[in-house]
Image: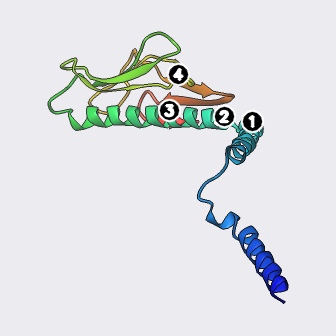
Amino acid sequence: MAPQRQSVAVLFDYMTRVCSMGTGRTGYSLVEAIIVVLIVGLLTFIAVPRLQFDTLRRKQAHTVAKKIVTDLRRTRALAISDAANNTAGFRLRMIGSSPYGSFEIVNLDTSAVVDSHSIDSAVTCSGGNQFDFGPLGNLLSGSDTQLTVSAQGRTYTITIVQATGAVKCE
């Protein structure tokens, strides 16, 4: 009876060791880590070409067009609000040659630059380069009246009404 009990004890001891072998692990093997990296790389390789970067560039054109419209309206508002002290008005001037890379707002009385902004290189901005607003908010004679902003097939036309200085974006 003793040898049978001994063999059962050995078998029990063996089963206990086999069952508890994997429970003491605290990390991953190199093979497991490489397999995970390969799977993530494969998914990235498939997913990245499907991203729509054109949509992002169209949104950039929209953002630039809205920024220029806002700054044209700001230039007009500055000309109206400072009419008592500045009879010359304010100018929004595009910097460089077409397509423009930046623009600035200038006080025509003192030639001081009030503000300046750059235009994203993925966006094309062309057309008029100088928009002068008088103390009544109207566009002064000799000023341009139209500007075009585009990127990836999306085009915005910014138009300023000469008589009133109203700014429209279509």
Instruction: Tell me: residue 127, above or below residue 54.
Output: above
**Residue at mark 4:** 121
Rendered-image quadrant of the N terminus: bottom right
Depth-wise, is mark 3 or mark 4 nearer the camera? 4
In the rendered structure, which amino acid carries the disc numbered 1? Phe
Depth-wise, is mark 1 or mark 3 nearer the camera? 1
Q: Secondary structure at mark 2?
A: helix
Q: How many marks?
A: 4
Q: Nearer the viewer, residue 42 or 131?
A: 42
Q: Which mark is residue 53?
A: 2
Instruction: Tell me: residue 49, above or below residue 14.
Output: above
Residue reaching furthest to the left: 85
In the rendered structure, which amino acid carries the disc numbered 4? Ser
Judge the density around disc 2: few (<14), some (14-19), many (≥20) Cα neighbours within 10 Å: few
- For residue 119, say whether it is visible: yes
* Residue located 76% across and 81% down the image: 9
Q: Secondary structure at mark 1?
A: helix
* CB within 8 Å, label 1 to label 3: no
